[in-house]
Image: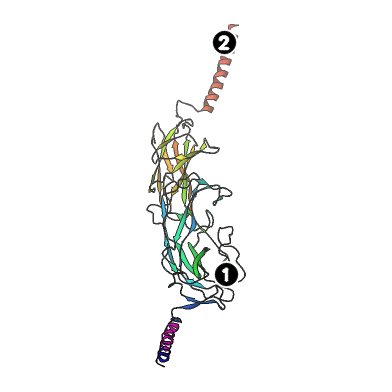
Amino acid sequence: MKKLLALLTAALMIVLLAVPAAASGTGNPGSRFVRRSHHGGEPTNSTTFDYKTDGKEATGTETQLHKYLVVEKDTVSPAITFSYTVAPGAASAAGTGTLPVYAGIGAPTVANVTFAAGAATTPGATGQPITDTTKLFASADITISFANITFDKPGVYRYILTEANSNTEGVGGVLYDVDAPDGTEGDRIRTIDVYVIDTEGVLSVQGYVSYKGTITGSPAQTYDPNGVAADGYANGSTATDATGLDEKSNQYINQVKTNTMTAKKVIAGNQGDKESKWNIKVDFTNLPTGVNVKYAKIEEKGTAVTNPTYADYTSGTALEYGHLDKYKFIGIPEGASYTVTETDANKEGYTTTYAAQTYTFASDTTIEDKDDAIVTNTRSGQIPTGIALGITGGVVLLALAVVYFVIRRRLSVRDEY
């Protein structure tokens, strides 16, 4: 009997010890949940877990957008730096057939993009990112890093990327976010969507999609962020996509505005020697560091030069001009000024006058082509009056003299007989 009682007591203790252990397996419903399929529905199994607790969160990676700096052909691009800010985008609840969009979390980082002076050397051409053959361009990547961010649930995380004004000293006249060179400026904003998915209980970043402007809608569940369109980003927008979700853009184009001017020589007056040569210089001020104006002779004696070749111009260098010769200066940045001076003005009896001798280019995005700087040298001589006779009077007197001598000769002959 004692042995039976001892066995029953031991069995009871085992049962009592097992009950709390079983109860503790239910977990805390506030912090743990039952895994469901990616598209919702019933649990795929009875295992309970937590993305964060179980280390199944997704760590962000990085993505790049392309950056193009464009200048006029034969000009020198300035040294310039562009910077960016990133902020959370607007959340958008999941709807019928659409994915949930969460406001971006954490603080992504974006490195500045810097171009060295003269970086734009690639000619625009068919098949190039810049197709305008009158332009040169340089390219770089804008790298957006999400490496310091951990995503703790599947969905779309939205961020707003904005390009700031360049604050590079001495550089202005920048056209921001143009669709093409010489195009209209955009709002400098890109919406970046980060796609986070669940694969067998493990989160990962599937891809990134960049849209032009600020997007507020939700993408369709059938939307493939890895589909490739002509712009290099997701393709396949459907009728269920929100307005604007097909306006993808993976690039920023910035054009540096430059101006031009010409200087022309004119020799005038009845004593002006059209074969004489004169030295004229152009002094430029307020040029950014590393930027050189270029020049070429575009007209010789009033006739256009075929395919003029441009070379670096050192401010204040005298060039030789003949009558109706014209030089063109290109790559002049906004805010710069010029002064035209003839180094041997008012010599040899000439009077030197100027048209548009000085000018300051506007500090805005209007491209100016100044074609009115003219240096004129005039020398005229007055015909003396009095003893010196005009051409007409001389002819008449000569005729009278001939008549006089003819008559006198005849009379002389007659008297001899």
Q: Where is 216 relative to 132, above or below? A: below
Residue 19 inside the magenta-drawn segment: yes
SS type, badge 2: helix
Front residue (pair 389, 211) = 211
* Count of marks overlaid on the render: 2
* Tag 2 residue: 412
Quarter-of-image position of residue 392: top right
Residue 323, position in %: x, y?
Answer: 49, 35
Q: What is the CA distance from the residue labelled 1 to the residue labelled 2? A: 117 Å
Q: Amino acid at mark 1?
A: Thr
Residue sitting at x 61%, y 64% = 236
Residue 18, position in %: x, y?
Answer: 43, 84
Q: Amino acid at mark 2?
A: Ser
Among numbered discs 1 and 2, the one appearing first in the sequence: 1
SS type, badge 1: loop
* Tag 1 residue: 243
Crowding near pointer 1: few (<14 within 10 Å), some, many (20+)?
Answer: some
Question: Image quadrant for the C terminus?
Answer: top right
Quarter-of-image position of residue 27: bottom left
Residue extending farthest top: 417
Please report the bounds of the magenta region as a residue range.
7-25
Name the main secondary structure of what is drawn in magenta.
helix
Residue 137, position in %: x, y?
Answer: 50, 49
Front residue (pair 34, 4) = 4
Residue 213 in view (yes/no): no
Residue 170 inside the magenta-drawn segment: no
